Amino acid sequence: MSTLLKPSQFPAIRMRRMRKDAFSRAMMRENVLTAADLIYPVFIQEGRNQRDKVTSMPGVERLSIDELLGVAEECVALGIPVLALFPVISSSLKTPDGIEATNPDGLVPRAVRELKRRYPELGIMTDAALDPYTSHGQDGVINAAGYVLNDETCELLVKQALTQAAAGVDIVAPSDMMDGRIGAIRNALEANQFIHTRIMAYSAKYASAFYGPFRDAVGSAANLGKSDKATYQIDPANSDEALREVGLDLAEGADMVMVKPGMPYLDIVRRVKDEFKVPTFAYQVSGEYAMLKAAAQNGWLDHDKVMMESMIAFKRAGADGVLTYFALDVARRLKLG
Ligand code: PBG
């Protein structure tokens, strides 16, 4: 076909040349995703042979420890390096101070011991925060006005972290946003010879409405009621503040940092990675998962395509890994090639 363009009007550079074939697209692909980039968050509960669906998170279930073992086995087979545990605590064990969080025979320490006994090569991570254990659903202890008390909460978080470390957990992940908790936990771990216990700090954790389905899953939503977490989690309007939090957590002894939520906060992931150049993780939270699942179930989005696109977007933003409820699906898909 002839062209009306004169030679001087031909594009000097044709970006589409490299995009034309699969081989040249592969040659210039900047980011890759592997199963090693995934951390799989799971909800655990008491009982045997127990699997209960989380309505607002299609495909996600609360598992008893025996059922969890099957999931752990699949993670090992698929090359997912880490499982992150989130407990559903019976309401009879919830108290204003969340003291059950420090029980060495509680649900989380039992799950950690069982997992490490059966699958020693699988990394296990646990949250340090009191919200699954408190009768009011806040991450710490509160005063009469409902304000979360910082230093009193830190003392309990230290005990919780030591309980988890004693059970053999590999990574403690404080998700509470109290000031000084990373330093306090690191000190206590060192003083008790847990020198190998890694800390992944939820450093840039925002006061987000995207945590809604998670709060349903662990049963803290009803207890929390109308109150929010704005006095300790970061205002979604800010990003310099997130960098300051990351800097503090690193100075206090964090090995890895996290940004949460994920997709709406990729600008923060990029800023953190550029500024600190440390292992940086992003949490694709329950609400993000619910959005994608709901649209896919309606036939409005292609499930696997948006799932994989969201993963590579995290990598492109600079994340070293992603906590995602899609982890098993993503790893299975990667295996198919
Ligand atoms: C608890 C905690 C939350 C999440 C992880 N740890 C909820 C919250 O801060 O209210 C949210 C995870 C998700 O939404 O998937 N401190």
Image (cartoon, helix red, strand yellow):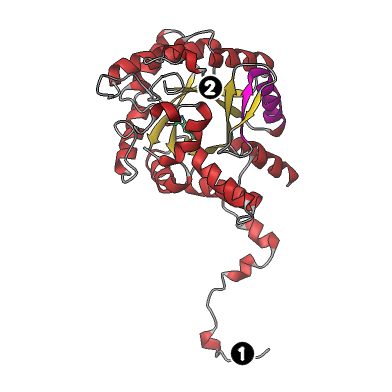
Horizontal arrangement in the rendering, residue 163 relative to residue 251 (left or right): right
Name the residue at 48% across, 13% down: 93
| SS assignment at label 1 | loop
Name the residue at 63% across, 49% down: 297
Tell me the kind of residue under disc 1. Answer: Thr
Image quadrant where one finds the N terminus: bottom right
Tell me the kind of residue under disc 2. Answer: Pro
Q: Earlier in the sequence, mark 2 or mark 1?
A: 1
Residue 289 x/y as whole percent:
55, 42
Check disc 2 and report the residue beneath it.
Answer: 87
Outermost residue on the right side: it is: 336
Residue 152 is one of the magenta-drawn residues: no
Question: Which span of residues is magenta-colored?
Answer: 60-77
Residue 69 is one of the magenta-drawn residues: yes
- Inspect this view and state whether residue 281 appears: no
Residue 163 x/y as whole percent:
48, 11
Q: Main secondary structure of the magenta part?
A: helix
Q: Residues within 10 Å of mark 2 (few under 14, many from 20)?
A: many
In the image, is residue 152 above or below residue 32? above
- Inspect this view and state whether residue 202 appears: yes
Horizontal arrangement in the rendering, residue 183 relative to residue 115 (left or right): left
Along the viewing direction, whichever of 182 and 328 lies nearer the viewer? 328
